[in-house]
Amino acid sequence: MHQGASLINTIAAALGLALIFGFAAARLRLPALVGYLLAGVIIGPFTPGFVADADIAAQLAEIGVMLLMFGVGLHFSLDDLLAVRKIALPGALVQIVAATLMGAGLATLWGWNLGAALVFGLALSVASTVVLLRALENLGLLDSHTGRIAVGWLVVEDLAMVLVLVLLPPLAGVLGGRAEGADGASLWRTLGITMLQVGGFLTLMLVVGRRVFPWLLWQVTRTGSRELFTLCVVAAAVSIAFASAALFGVSFALGAFFAGMVMRESEFSHRAAEESLPLRDAFAVLFFVSVGMLFDPMVLVQRPLQVLAVVLVIVVGKSVAACALVLAFRYPLATALTVSASLAQIGEFSFILIALGLKHQMLPPEAQSLVLAGALISIATNPLWFGAIGPMQRWLHAHSPLARRLEARDDPLAELPMSTEARYLSRQVVLVGYGRVGRRIAAELRAQDIPFVVADQNRELVERLREDGVAAVWGDAAEPAVLIQAHIARARVLVVATPDALNVRQMIETARTLNPAIETVVRSHNEAEAKLLTQEADATVFLGEHELAQAMARDVLRRAAVA
């Protein structure tokens, strides 16, 4: 048989069965990725019949991870990452510690030694960035502040795991495994080299890459060739990810993510995201199929209670810990529930950790089966937890006084300072969202000397606005308390400039209840949603593509008239 046949067979079987089972899952109103995972189980080595090449599938999955993380980086700027650092950095580190202790405690109950328990706990502590991104994209939350918190949280987790993977081999002897340079000098030297590598990678990407890669994309665009443009995007994603791993020791996913971030500086970043979308989707499917291929269904028969315990740690233990942490940072309940659902799964880093632990004889053989079972079940059920966020939030608000108190806590950023109230008691505009659109609207209002109050869910942003003398209140504008603090009762106009339009109707209803005469202006990217808001909420809706077309048409008519 031809040597390339194994590659062709693997791709054909993986994509073909993924389509069949993904379609069947969708018809049964289950997440499509459940079908992808099942397709992987069927063509895996633990079930009878055709067996795909697991090594090839894993490499194809790595390409999917690179392209997906590159695409996210194209929508995620350095400013977005820094804006959530105050919650993402401490939150991720504390959550890793909490989840590791839970997993280690479970392994200790099974009689494993300290080293095995520690590695097992670490494997359960880190979530899959790929699974999170698919969920956020499907829900339209990737560009929201909550989505940025979740992505920033997992980026911190990935950076932490890079250090763990480097430090684990020299510590193997101390932790009961096969020693590999376990003396103190070697350990500190390894840690120092790793920190220098990661620091060098970040510096190179953010200082040099932000200038070189956008310039390169512009040069390719000037050729006018669509094929070269697509090739440049894909080559940048894969090549930079590979070079980052080979030269600096960071993961493929992290390298691709930062490659996308620096490419975002180009004015053609949106086109780059669109051109790479079909490849990203196809290879992301292969990622889920490759995960399914690793799963041995017999572990469910041989160790059902242990599998259940692992799943509970991943889905319940990690989620409760993350929810408590987000609430402790005074973020809304909706944000806490979204971050909790984001972390209720494990993925690629968990597999690498377990493989490394087995290589250095730190783990018993059954550890891999348990982690793979936990990964498969948690990934398959993850969309269900995201879908339960809305109903759970409503139920908690209706039945839990504690949940209502958490939303209405005494917080200095949730109230306007007394010194600003007199200026904004009448004629002001309430501006919900201070992103790229909101900032431009605020600049025009400021130029016309029209007072406005900003309402935003980004605490760090509200802090900065207040330092600059801008009236701003922190919180979800769908909550009446937030609009009351923004003096909606005496406002003339409510402007919803945030792309996260899930609660727009609730914002408008609350505003109209408190101020029946208020006018509402809303931003939308969806034509059907724009029609509904215009008809049902009597709002003035600006649709991005429609406004762009009108502006271009006006300019064309002006030029034609001059000619």
Image (cartoon, helix red, strand yellow):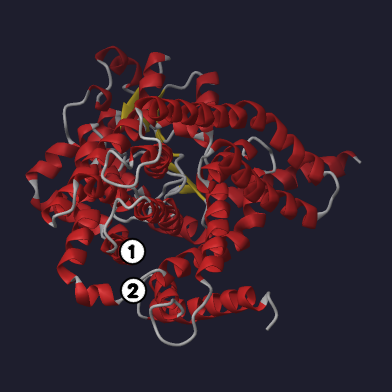
Observer-nearest of 500 and 65: 65
Which residue is at 53% across, 68% downward? 57
Residue 471: image quadrant is: top left
Helix, strand or loop under label 1:
helix
Query: What type is the residue that disc 1 sits on?
Result: Leu
- Sort mark 1 into few (<14), some (14-19) or many (20+) by Cα contacts within 10 Å: many
From what the image shows, is residue 454 above or below residue 25? above
Disc on res. 325: none
Query: What type is the residue that disc 2 sits on?
Result: Asp
Instruction: List x then y, in percent, for residue 244.
Output: 59, 40
Helix, strand or loop under label 2:
loop
Q: Are marks 2 and 1 in contact (CB under 8 Å)?
A: yes
Q: Quadrant of the C terminus?
A: top right
Instruction: State whether residue 542 appears in this view.
Output: no
From what the image shows, is residue 164 above or below residue 380? above
Q: On the picture, is 66 further left or further right than 487?
A: right
Instruction: State whether residue 96 appears in this view.
Output: yes
Give the mark, 2 or 1, whose residue is nearer the N terminus.
Answer: 2
From what the image shows, is residue 363 above or below residue 296? above
- Sort mark 2 into few (<14), some (14-19) or many (20+) by Cα contacts within 10 Å: some
Q: Quadrant of the N terminus?
A: bottom right
Q: Residue furthest top?
A: 419
Which residue is at 47% across, 34% downward? 80
Disc on res. 372: 1
Which residue is at 50% across, 20% downward? 446
CA gap, disc 2 and disc 1: 8 Å
Instruction: List x then y, in percent, for residue 256.
Output: 57, 45
Residue 466: image quadrant is: top left
User: Dot 2 corresponds to which residue?
Assistant: 296
Q: On the picture, is 490 further left or further right than 180?
A: left
